[in-house]
Image: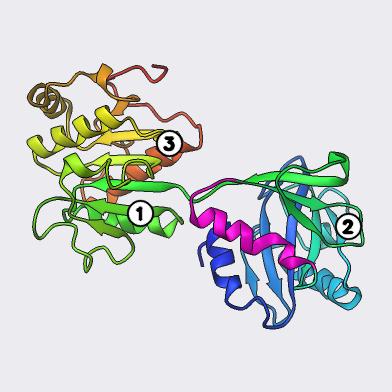
């Protein structure tokens, strides 16, 4: 199962009244931990676990703690100290060496399902959410939007799935779309040519055959956090970059063009563009140099670079710079 909160809630919403549910949220960490504050997962009374708050080492004990919450109907806070030999975390053999505190909250119709249906609606619309958990035990309560007395709440921001737009629907776009879908991203593939970007080849993605000049009008560019241009046709690649330069998508955090430096130069020349026309640094050649020349390896290298860019990690390692990263 995919572990982004969007996918967890998509599964849960159809079963929210089937038995008892519990939301576990990491509210504090000290030292090393598998997940950081804000990570959430859901448990149900049949033993179902959706999401992760550790590498699988805490979840069995958390289910035991969940039963206590269901018996009382109250929330509770639990702390696991991986450095304390007397702590359950030590006995479980957890090797992270840090401390993790979690808030456990029953999810019921009486507490408005902790506002989780509203969270899902916002994430579906690619909107971020300010989510607040009431710390005044034993009441289980959550709220969206601003809160009073912030010290009595644990607050964090829930962000939607990352969105990848692949411009070019050839055979090598298929593993790229599949890998992006597997890590929970929303994937769109568009190619104006017949027999490209076919829905049958991209079951994990939305597909379009829009002319490149119409991408902005249909909102395809505005939804993209990352765009990879890979038509394998210089004219189409140039049209794609021109459309991006004219619309300048507000959310765009990564832009790449498949192919070597000399080809990128031709694309710019034939499109009448310069690197300064683009809204951010163009990554070309696209991806990290990890070796391998098969579509799957190239897809991995490009997706890894896009992931690094969108999560604010160093990602520019290609020797040729079409535009400085800081521009």
- Foreground mark, 3 or 1, reads 3
Question: Chief secondary structure of the magenta span?
Answer: helix
Label 2 sits on residue? 87
Q: Tell me the residue at 46%/28% (across/down).
A: 314
For the residue carrying disc 1, how many other residues have a C-alpha within 10 Å: few (<14), some (14-19), or many (20+)?
many
Q: Tell me the residue at 43%/34% (across/down).
A: 309
- Mark 2–mark 1 distance (CA, rounded to whole Å): 43 Å
Q: Quadrant of residue 179?
A: bottom left
Residue 127 lies in the magenta stretch = yes
For the residue carrying disc 3, how many other residues have a C-alpha within 10 Å: few (<14), some (14-19), or many (20+)?
few
Q: Earlier in the sequence, mark 3 or mark 1?
A: 1
Quadrant location of the C terminus in the rendered image: top left
Label 1 sits on residue? 187
Q: Which residues are magenta?
A: 111-128
Label 3 sits on residue? 251
Disc 3 secondary structure class: loop
Disc 1 secondary structure class: strand
In percent of width and height, residue 322 lies at: 26, 20
């Amino acid at each position: 199962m995919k572990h982004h909160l969007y996918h967890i809630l998509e599964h849960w919403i159809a079963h929210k009244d089937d038995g008892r549910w519990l939301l576990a949220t990491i509210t504090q960490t000290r030292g090393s931990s598998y997940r950081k504050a804000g990570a959430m997962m859901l448990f149900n009374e049949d033993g179902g676990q959706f999401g992760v708050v550790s590498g699988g080492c805490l979840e069995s004990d958390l289910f035991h703690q969940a039963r206590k919450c269901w018996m009382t109907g109250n929330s509770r806070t639990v702390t696991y100290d991986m450095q304390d030999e007397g702590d359950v975390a030590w006995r479980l053999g957890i090797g992270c060496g840090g401390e993790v505190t979690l808030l456990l909250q029953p999810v019921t119709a009486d507490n408005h399902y902790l506002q989780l249906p509203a969270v899902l609606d916002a994430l579906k619309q690619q909107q971020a959410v300010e989510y607040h958990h009431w710390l005044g035990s034993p009441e289980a309560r959550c709220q969206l939007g601003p809160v009073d007395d912030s010290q009595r709440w644990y607050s964090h921001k829930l962000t939607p799935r990352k969105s990848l737009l692949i411009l070019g629907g050839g055979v090598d776009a298929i593993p790229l779309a599949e890998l992006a879908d597997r890590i929970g991203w929303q994937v769109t593939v568009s190619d104006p040519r017949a027999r490209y970007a076919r829905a049958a080849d991209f079951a994990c993605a939305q597909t379009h055959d829009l002319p490149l000049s119409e991408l902005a009008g249909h909102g395809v560019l505005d939804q993209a956090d990352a765009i990879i241009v890979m038509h394998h046709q210089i004219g189409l690649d140039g049209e794609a970059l021109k459309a991006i330069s004219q619309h300048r998508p507000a959310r765009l955090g990564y832009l790449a063009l498949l192919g070597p430096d000399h080809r990128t130069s031709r694309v710019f020349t034939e499109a009448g563009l310069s690197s300064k026309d683009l809204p951010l640094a163009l990554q070309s050649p696209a991806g990290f140099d990890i070796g391998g020349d098969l579509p799957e390896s190239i897809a991995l290298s490009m997706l890894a670079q896009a992931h690094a860019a969108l999560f604010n990690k160093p990602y520019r390692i290609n020797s040729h710079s079409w535009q400085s990263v800081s521009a």
